Amino acid sequence: MAKLNDIKDFIVKLFNKDVLEKSQGDFAFKFDFEKEIKMIAYSTNLTLFTINTGASAGADLLITHHDAWEFLGEQRDYCYKLLNDKKLNHCFIHTPLDAAEFGTSQSIAQGLNLENKKFTAFYHGLLVGVAGDLKKMTFEELVKRCEAVLCEKVRIFRNNSQNPSRILIVTGGGCETRFIDDAVNERCDTYITGEYNMYLQHYAEFRNVNLIIGSHTKTEIIGVRSLVNKILTQFKDIKAFEIIEPSY
């Protein structure tokens, strides 16, 4: 059976060293209780719900995309206390996973069978968005395909009349209007992300870019799942459990 350091060493080798250096503080192993890792639970978020669910399932390690961020205040402290009380190891991988070839936006792009994929759209100095060409498909068919990939209903804003042909994906909190400029610069007619605000809607309409909005949670769990599958391929004796969170 693997120890946490074995898994840590394996994960680090999956990522570009330069990406990890640029992501200091956005990727960490928070605990090491020096026990064998037999079960991994994974989710997008580190919350009381995911900690309790993972611990109840018998997990030895919880892998998440997000940490309990500083702006969560007392909730952050309580999450760390609960991890310690449950003796549950924790690893979160944020921007490195967004920028990975097997990561969040790339996983959705693969699920949609996009061609000629390329990284674009900066976040904290890293390219985290993926643009790609779509095989012949109507907008309605694309929406259904997105819902199948994300396993959730999506919110849509149709802002042009053509069939979609080139897509930009920025998972999670991609509601900044600058990402619409990235879409236009990449000749994309449709933008897919995981958060919505009024200004994104207005600006996408102005730039004639369709919007497909999933949830922050569901647009990013697909990348965490891809990472865990790589771990399971390497460590055959480890089992994994995906925590089904509420879709925010």
Image: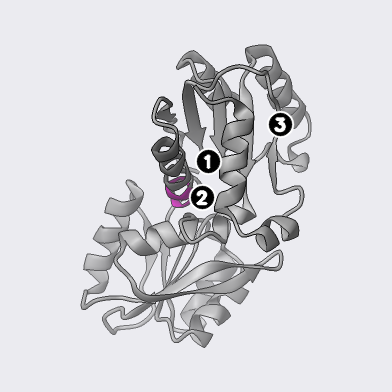
Closer to us: 241 or 50 = 241
Nearest the camera: 175 or 120? 120
Q: Is residue 83 visible?
A: yes
The residue at 73%/37% (across/down) is 72
Say which residue label 3 marks: 30
Comparing labels 1 and 2, the label whose residue is closer to the camera: 1
Considering only vertical position in the picture, is 238 above or below 128? above
Corner quadrant of residue 84: top right
Our reading of the magenta stretch's main secondary structure is helix
| Cα separation between marks 1 and 2 | 9 Å
How many C-alpha atoms fall within 10 Å of the one at disc 2: few (<14), some, or many (≥20)?
many
Q: Position of residue 178 (x, y in %)?
A: 62, 75
Separation (CA) of disc 1 from disc 3: 16 Å
Does residue 91 lie above or below 183 as drawn? above
- Numbered label attached to residue 144: none
Judge whether 103 appears above or below 205 on screen.
Answer: above
Examine the rendering and report whether any part of residue 46 can be seen. no
Residue depicted at x 30% and y 75%: 134
Residue position for label 1: 44
The image shows residue 181 at horizontal and vertical percentages of 57, 81
Q: Which residues are magenta?
A: 219-223
- Which residue does the numbered mark 2 point to in the structure image? 216
What residue type is disc 1 on?
A: Thr
> In what element is the residue under mark 1?
loop
Rendering coords of residue 223 (x, y %):
46, 50
